[in-house]
Amino acid sequence: MPSGSTGRLLVVDFYTQARLPGWFRWGLRHWLARFGVEPRPEMVELLIRQAQLQAAAVTTRPLYHDYAVAVNYRRAA
């Protein structure tokens, strides 16, 4: 977000699927690749670091055994 702006960014990423069976994780990643989609778990860490630099707040919530992660990035005035 540009300096001085306020707002909220909501992101849902497919994340690591670490707590799901290997066969499901493999199938999901191959299915997603058909649409040019791939999990980006590093994005969560990037948003957390960015929030620290910009005095923003970030909350993360794993969904369905790490099938996905919901990230809520909030920046106040």
Image: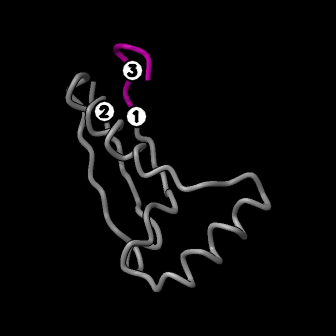
Q: Residue under circle 1?
A: 7
Query: Of helix, strand and loop, which one carries label 1?
Result: strand
Q: Is residue 8 left or right of residue 52?
A: right
Q: Which mark is residue 75?
A: 2
Which residue lies most toward the right here? Answer: 34
Q: Is residue 66 left or right of residue 54?
A: right
- 60 is higher (above) or lower (below) than 50: below
For the residue marked with disc 3, what is the amino acid?
Ser
What span is colored magenta in the figure? 1-7
Marks 2 and 1 in Cβ contact (< 8 Å): yes
Q: Which mark is residue 5?
A: 3
Mark 1 is surrounded, within 10 Å at the Cα level, by few (under 14), some (14 to 19) or many (20 or more) other residues, namely few
Marks 1 and 3 in Cβ contact (< 8 Å): yes
Tell me if residue 74 is in the magenta stretch. Answer: no
Q: Quadrant of the N terminus?
A: top left
Q: Is residue 21 left or right of residue 36?
A: left
For the residue marked with disc 1, what is the amino acid?
Gly
- 21 is higher (above) or lower (below) than 28: below
Marks 3 and 2 in Cβ contact (< 8 Å): yes
Alpha-carbon span between mark 3 and mark 2: 8 Å
Nearest the eye: 27 or 2: 27
Mark nearer the N terminus (2 vs 1): 1
Nearest the eye: 75 or 70: 70
Mark 3 is surrounded, within 10 Å at the Cα level, by few (under 14), some (14 to 19) or many (20 or more) other residues, namely few
Query: Of helix, strand and loop, which one carries label 3?
Result: loop
